[in-house]
Amino acid sequence: MCGIFGHIGKISAEQANICIDRLAHRGPDGKDVQRLGNVTLGHRRLAILDLTDQGRQPMSYADHRYWITFNGEVYNFIEIRTELQAKGYTFKSNSDTEVILAAYAEWKEQCLERFNGMWAFAIWDAKEQLLFLSRDRFGKKPLFYIEVPGGFAFASEMKALFPLLTDVRPNIRLIKNPARIFQYESTPECVIEGINRFPAGHFGRWKDNKLTIHRWWCTLDHIHEVSGSYNEHVEQFKSLFLDSCRLRMRSDVPIGTALSGGLDSSSVISVMAHIGRGDKGSRISEDWQHAFVASFPGTPLDESRYAKMVTDHLGIGATFLDINPLKVIDRIYDYLYLFEDLYITSPIPFMMTYGAMRSQGIKVTIDGHGADELFGGYSFDYLYALIDAGLNLKTANMILNTFYNAYPKGSEQFQLPPKWMYWARWHSINLASRILHRSSRTGMDTTHPRWKELDTLNRILYASTHESILPTLLRNYDRYSMAHGVEIRMPFMDHRIVSFAFSVPWMSKIRNGFTKSLVRDAMAPFMPHEVAYRRSKIGFNSPIVNWMRGPLKSFFLDIINSSSFKDCILINPSNVTRKIKHVMENPKVSFSSGEQAWMLLTPYLWEQAVIKRGRREP
């Protein structure tokens, strides 16, 4: 919902303003900087709840003892506010920000466990001379920090800290290792040397020139026994998801959604329609009928016909966006500067989608991210269920059929090897694990006592959710949307749903030949049957193969023939050139080859967009 910045120590007003203005895209609705002795708090506002000046930040509470700069939303703020009012607390605004301050005054760090939302915030306690920092359970909202001479600084994005660095230097060890592209977001390491990432699910205290960080959330502490049959699991999920969507529809501005036509985004808009036509409750926006569909005509990634099935079924309109890269290719370096990080695909479709939302007055979008990681939507994850199937050939065959049915038939870009290769691989893994009586899986929670209670598929999904794929995607979508002053809310990422997802067995996720079966069966009453039980999975991505061969061919050729490309130390220019030409010239090239070519080129583009601009600007 905003961009935040803070500094402890000596900093001029001019430099503080330079830092906070680097976040103007995150908060185009207002700006304020508060100087409190040697503490500076800055805020760029995206006004969503309480649009009046009473909702401005930095905000104070309790006779200016507590000051906050906050990015995010606490969706259950109305319920918490009612509880605090019963304890004698009073409020001047109708914002969730003031509720956070009062909750911290009452419960200190225990307040975090009461919040249902996404956030990164800092609270300055003037009496204790203490800075309290916190980040939400799963890292939906970003927070970076550095130590500066005699003090400390933090911000929503790395670029806001660039003016405080002696030099903007790339972390070459990380950038030159493509294998780590999904591995570093859940660690403190960043692509810029000297900048640290504050960890998700942690809080910190800066006092007496020292930062101490403590973990306050671990999902394994919150898994629970889920009793009953599969059908009862479906009903439990349905109830949780409806309530999650209801909370996330609280807004004082119109709401949109990015609709792909896949199960997850269709679930979100279908439930929004169900809620919007019923008893809506407090602060739920009535202006929610804004679906935006990214269309890729003539490519294997186009899903627009499924999206139209959903909007027709719901009786609402939609904005169909023709993602033509030629319209925005001249902005690619601006997009990458705003994005800051590395990824395996072009940011163009995502930037165009959320840019279109903002141009039509949408500041909030409720999207379907998280379901694949929680409920087994990726083929490379759910094949691990073959280990759980053991020697049950019928169950193992069901899993393999599920895998093969997930890919578009007849597409040269999605070719699969014969089934026997998967049989051989996964049965050998299963046999090896039985012989060794152990798992080679390592991660931040593998020593937790409850880790052993998870089946194999849930262990893999847990790692995808907390350590690799999902943290990376949460970061990506924060950047794509906030580059245009749009906030994404994610009902699947409600902490109650995450805990539930790792409390149910794998057979509630891969069932009867379908992935995410629990979600499908719960959401089917709200959407077209063909969408709910659609087997093929495409995903929101860039059709990079089509683009490299067609509209962007000259763009890529110009790059690989440039002197700056050939001199870039972050890449192997000859290898990247070979990969790109392979995509351009091989008529049967796979989608993954196109993705790899882009990924290997990205460090060069990133250097041009981020490092050179970061050094050039004041």
Image (cartoon, grey):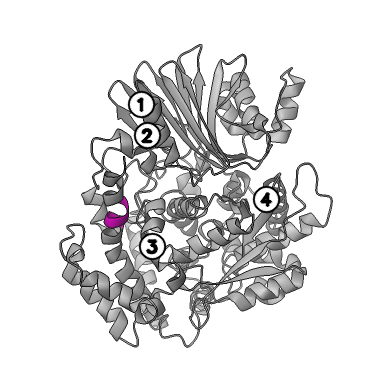
Q: Do residues under tags 4 and 2 come within 8 Å of each other at their CB atoms?
A: no
Which quadrant is home to the C terminus?
A: top left
Q: Do residues under tags 3 and 4 come within 8 Å of each other at their CB atoms?
A: no
Q: If you read the primary sequence from the N terminus, does the residue marked by circle 4 or circle 2 appear first?
A: 2
Q: CA distance from mark 4 to mark 2?
A: 43 Å
Q: CA distance from mark 3 to mark 2?
A: 27 Å
Magenta residue check for 586: no
Determine the secondary structure under disc 3. Answer: helix
Amino acid tagged 3: Ile
Amino acid tagged 2: Tyr
Q: CA distance from mark 1 to mark 2?
A: 7 Å
Location of residue 143 in the rendering, given as x and y in whole percent from the top left corner? 43, 38
Residue bearing mark 3: 332
The boundaries of the magenta stretch are 606-610
Q: Is residue 369 above or below residue 284?
A: below
Q: Residues within 10 Å of mark 3 (few under 14, many from 20)?
A: some
Q: If you read the primary sequence from the N terminus, does the residue marked by circle 3 or circle 2 appear first?
A: 2
Q: Residues within 10 Å of mark 1 (few under 14, many from 20)?
A: some
Using the rendered image of the protein, determine whether residue 230 is visible from the camera's viewpoint. Answer: no
Nearer to me, 67 or 593: 67
Location of residue 377 in the rendering, given as x and y in whole percent from the top left corner? 52, 65
Nearer to me, 456 or 140: 140
| Nearer to us: label 3 or label 2 | 3
Q: If you read the primary sequence from the N terminus, does the residue marked by circle 1 or circle 3 appear first?
A: 1
Residue bearing mark 2: 145
Residue bearing mark 1: 152
Residue bearing mark 4: 227
Amino acid tagged 1: Phe
Location of residue 69 in the rendering, given as x and y in whole percent from the top left corner? 52, 30
Which quadrant is home to the N terminus?
A: top right
